Amino acid sequence: MNGYQSLLNSEPVLKRLSIIQLLAYFGAWFSNIAIYTLLLKLNLSADVIAFVAMLHFLAGIVQAPVSGSIIDSIKPKKLMSILIIVQIISTISLLFINDVNDLWLLYILIFIKMAAASFYFTTEMSLLPKILNDKKLQKANELHSIIWSFSYTLGMAISGFIVYILGVKVAFILDASIFTICFYLLYTLDIKVEILKNSTNLIVMMKDTFKYLKKSPNAIHLMLLHAFVGLSAFDALIALMVNKYYASIIAISLALGLLNAFRAIGLVIGPIILSNWVNNKRLSYIFIFQAIALWLWALAIENFYLSLFVSIIVGLFSTTLWSYTYTLLQKNIDEKYYGRIIAYNDMLFLSMATFTSFMIGFLATNGQSLQTITILIGFGFIVGAIYFQWILKTKDI
């Protein structure tokens, strides 16, 4: 952890962005638990729950073709400030959701909120390579995943109790309040980054990006590799677990919070343990370990307390996969294309997460057990391991 502390002390912009990131992610889980608690209390079907999980990722897919070009054309502080304001408004508007008749409004607000969140994330990840060298960049990506996991752990656990004790509405208000603090912290931050002037329009920039990708096949393969991490979009799976196996022994919001919190313990610990061990030759092992962890989860799924323990193991490898594959991509693209390539990378990642959420709902609705679904997701990571071995043997990265 000393290496991460030294990095933050030497990079004040990264330090402030990390604080904003910690607060924003922490607040987001209040809304997340509240939304799924509301859906389960309304006794909605598995496909509706899966569709809501899909919406959390779909927004980032839809906007990706233009977001990258916008990121490469507008100063990051201005763009990120606007996106935080959008998240504040969409979050507080969730207070108007009361029953099944308001589902259409819930869908719209989730789409807008997550579109802004995804846009903000892509903007930040495009900014980091411009202010950090390669060595610091990998540490910054690891730190990002640790912060996400840490806030996920506390956010999910605390929000479960908040929703249980104070209700869904209070969770939405707390989330919006935290975003307001984030806006102030960003507004008072001085980010000095030169934007490369480009007089071409968005369509021309998009065409230029595709030409670049055609000449840079390594970037395409690394984008596809990172997309495999989208298989870890377990939100719908966990909600269905709670509804089928655990709702009779513990309150819904508490079960959701605890399951996600225990998984996030693994997410926090993973990069700390594996950071100095993982490299290109060993990355395939991380994919395989993730698959094995999911198969263990499938065996433990009916036992709430055993499932809590195994979920730590499930989370142990996810953040390392995310941060390492992201860093590989960042190191293998030109600065001119950071915003656009990372936007398309996020689009592929979110597409995989959306597909995963859809298939969880589809398979569950059509009679497949949650154990079978979990096992199938595990095999997806085996495919990722094989794919990366092929990349190593045939490409120079």
Image: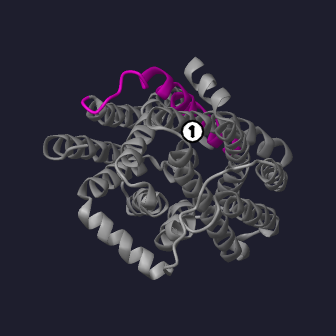
Above or below, 340 relative to 242: below
Is residue 4 shown left or right of residue 327?
right
Residue shown at 60%/66% (left/top)? 115
Quarter of the figure with the N terminus: top right
Whether residue 268 is in magenta: the answer is: yes
Whether residue 185 is in magenta: the answer is: no
SS label for mark 1: helix
Which range is magenta? Answer: 252-281
Is residue 131 shown left or right of residue 113?
left
Residue 76: x and y, percent?
64, 58
Figure label count: 1
Q: Residue furthest left?
A: 394
Secondary structure of the magenta portion, mostly?
A: helix
Between residues 299 and 220, which one lies in front from this camera angle?
A: 220
Residue 139: x and y, percent?
50, 32
Above or below, 45 relative to 309: below
Give, as a three-letter code, the residue at label 1. His
Decide if residue 292 is in sight here.
Answer: yes
Between residues 234 and 130, which one lies in front from this camera angle?
A: 130
Residue 69: x and y, percent?
51, 70
Quarter of the figure with the C terminus: top left
Decide if residue 350 is in sight here.
Answer: no
Above or below, 368 relative to 202: above
Q: Quadrant of residue 153?
A: top right
Residue shown at 42%/45% (left/top)? 326
Q: Quadrant of residue 2?
A: top right
Residue 299: x and y, percent?
38, 33
For label 1, the residue is 144
Q: Quadrant of residue 12?
A: top right
Residue shown at 66%/51% (left/top)? 192
Is residue 255 shown left or right of residue 381?
right
